Image (spheres, rainbow, N blue to C red):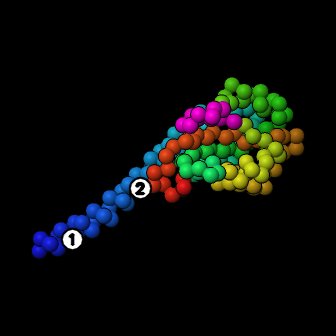
Amino acid sequence: MMTKRLCIGVFAGFFFIPLTAFLCSILLNELRLSRLEKYAASFLHPRDARHLRHSASVGNFAPASNQCAFAVADYWSAPMSKEEVLKFYELYIADSPEPRVRRFSVRFVDELDSLFMAIYSDVFRREHLEPLQNETLYITLADEGGYFPNLDIRCH
């Protein structure tokens, strides 16, 4: 009887400990993504801008690496020129090569190159988003990277 309980306990331990570690990695990364979404939502946008689409993703966005990164993209259309859009967001734009630093950038859909699209394929999907006449279509991107992937399969 004792041997049977011991076998069941050992089996349960070998099954539940890795499962718990796996789930904790995923939940921790979802929490980090949620915080980044709150960061991205904290910015002001032009009054006349139309929000078209929101996308958030966890993954390994750096080719040839093994890290976990987070990206939040919002598609916008505004009756402004590209220069006016950049001027509006210039106080928010932050770029840093350091890991685990939140970055914010503005990208224009018609200027996205194929390498950028390949790296962020989970975040940017080439959808048929048409701006109105005399409007500029752009993306606000908040991203953060450089975290260990742990057991989250999305980061490998």
Q: Give how far apart the Cα atoms at labels 2 and 1 are.
A: 24 Å
Question: Residue shown at 46%/51% (left/top)?
Answer: 150
* Amino acid identity at mark 1: Cys
Q: Which residue is mark 1?
A: 7
Quarter occupied by residue 20: bottom left
Quarter holding the N terminus? Answer: bottom left
Q: Which residue ends up furthest to the right in the rendered image? A: 134
Residue at (82, 46) in percent of width and height: 110
Query: In the figure, 60 relative to 97: above or below?
Result: below
Q: Residue furthest top?
A: 91
- Residue 72 at what x, y percent from top left? 62, 44
Q: Which residues are magenta?
A: 95-105
**Secondary element type, mark 1:** helix
> Could you tell whether 31 is left or right of 143 in the image?
left
Q: Residue at x 72, y 27 (%)?
A: 90
> Which one is in front, 114 or 52?
114
Between disc 2 and disc 1, whose residue precedes?
Answer: 1
Residue at the outermost front position:
64
Where residue 109 appears, as percent x and y from the top left, is: 79, 45
Q: Does 120 sit above or below residue 2?
A: above
Q: Where is mark 2, residue-wise?
A: 23
Towards the viewer: 14 or 25: 14
- The quarter of the picture where residue 143 lies is top right
Badge 1 crowding class, 10 Å Cα cut-off, few under 14, some 14 to 19, many 20 or more, is few
Q: Quadrant of the C terminus?
A: bottom right
Q: Is residue 25 left or right of residue 124?
A: left
